[in-house]
Image (cartoon, helix red, strand yellow):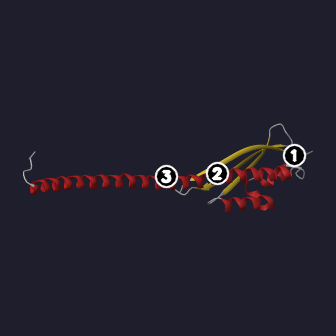
Amino acid sequence: MLIPRSSRQVRQLAASRRGRIGGFMLIEVLVSVLIFSVGVLAVVGLQATMSRAQAASKDRADAASLANEVIGLMWSDTGAINSLAAINSYSGSACAAYARCADWANKVAANLPKGASNITVTLVTGETSVFDVNVTITWALPDGGTHTYTTQTTVSMNS
């Protein structure tokens, strides 16, 4: 290190040190901005992921609610149902001909993206008025795949 001998040399030495310190501070600021930018991008990515997860969760909840709704409709019809043929009005393609079931199927199509439903009703072996009911609801996912919700219950007719 040089020992300054004149005031001019002292000023030159101080100026060169300030230049090096100022350059170091500029690098610190640039690194800080880079770290902050990465953090902001991570938050934006997290927000997008959370939005997709929320939409998928809503679709699953809607499917479960719709499946429970049609089972409730079937239970409310059990007083009027007195034969396998009558309860089969909910099953498969017969659903479209029965107004309550058709309205429900239209609701599935309206509330879920590319929503579709299928109900199967089968008589429990050894029983005359107890039926196993399977409700399957499918819908499209934003990435092009499909998701399925299936539930099963037992419905018995009033005698």
Q: Which residue is mark 3?
A: 46
Residue, x 27% and y 53% (percent of image)? 25
Q: Nearer the viewer, residue 90 or 29?
A: 29
Residue 22: which quarter of the image? bottom left
Residue 58's spot in the image, x, y percent? 63, 54
Q: Amino acid at mark 1?
A: Met
Which mark sits nearer the N-terminus, 3 or 1?
A: 3
The span from disc 3 to disc 2 (Cα, nearest Å) is 21 Å
- Residue corresponding to mark 1: 157
Q: Is residue 98 visible?
A: no
- Observer-side mark, 3 or 2, equals 3
The kind of secondary structure element at disc 1 is loop
Q: Earlier in the sequence, mark 3 or mark 2?
A: 3
* SS assignment at label 2: helix
* Residue at the image point whose x is 68% and y is 63% from the top: 110
Which residue is under mark 2?
Answer: 60
Q: Position of residue 140 (x, y in %)?
A: 59, 57
Dot in front, 2 or 1: 2
How many C-alpha atoms fall within 10 Å of the one at disc 2: few (<14), some, or many (≥20)?
Answer: some
Distance Cα–Cα, label 2 vs label 1: 30 Å
Q: Quadrant of residue 37?
A: bottom left
